């Protein structure tokens, strides 16, 4: 955490980046319905972790962090769904 803090990157950028990565990989492979459940679960995870910070000394609760997490989920899933046919096409070419 100290190394990340030394980079002086806005914490909202870190939240978005983390949740983009968490949502991106499942969106490349999972079916739409399962991906929807995963995305909802990731948003719920962000909300629950933020509420958990209320119980942790030295941590702060911010609704903006929840919004950043949700934005990251939407962005990651969107990019993954966009990339899905391109990745599948490449894998089919390599197998053939």
Image (cartoon, rainbow, N blue to C red):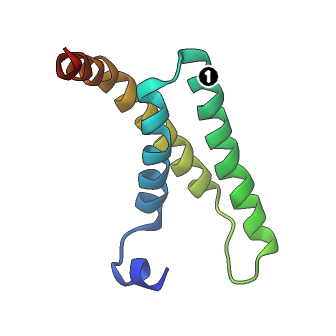
> Residue 44, percent across and down?
70, 43
Taking the image as shown, residue 53 lies to the left or right of residue 72, namely: right
- Total marks placed: 1
Residue at x 63% of width, y 42% of height: 43
* Figure quadrant of the C terminus: top left
Return the residue found at the far right.
Answer: 55
Taking the image as shown, residue 46 lies to the left or right of residue 20, namely: right
Viewer-closest of 83 and 90: 90
Secondary structure category for the residue under label 1: helix
Q: Is residue 18 above or below residue 59?
A: above
Q: Classify 10 Å Cα crowding around label 1: few (below 14), some (14-19), many (20 and above).
A: few
Q: Quadrant of residue 49?
A: bottom right
Viewer-closest of 34 and 5: 34
Viewer-closest of 57 and 94: 94
**Residue to which mark 1 is pinned:** 34
> Residue 80, percent across and down?
38, 30
Return the residue found at the far front.
Answer: 96
> Residue 39, percent across and down?
59, 33
> Residue 56, percent across and down?
76, 76
Q: Is residue 32 above or below residue 27?
A: above
Q: Is residue 23 above or below residue 88?
A: below
Q: Quadrant of residue 63?
A: bottom right
Residue at x 25% of width, y 23% of height: 91
Taking the image as shown, residue 57 lies to the left or right of residue 87, namely: right
């Amino acid at each position: 955490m100290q190394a990340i803090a030394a980079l002086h990157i806005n914490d909202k950028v870190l939240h978005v980046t983390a949740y983009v990565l968490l949502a991106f990989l499942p969106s490349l492979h999972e079916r739409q319905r399962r991906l929807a459940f995963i995305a909802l679960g990731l948003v719920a995870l962000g909300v629950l972790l933020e509420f958990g910070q209320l119980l942790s000394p030295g941590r702060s609760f911010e609704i903006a962090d929840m919004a950043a997490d949700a934005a990251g989920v939407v962005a990651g899933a969107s990019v993954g769904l966009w990339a899905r046919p391109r990745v599948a096409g490449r894998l089919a070419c390599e197998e053939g």
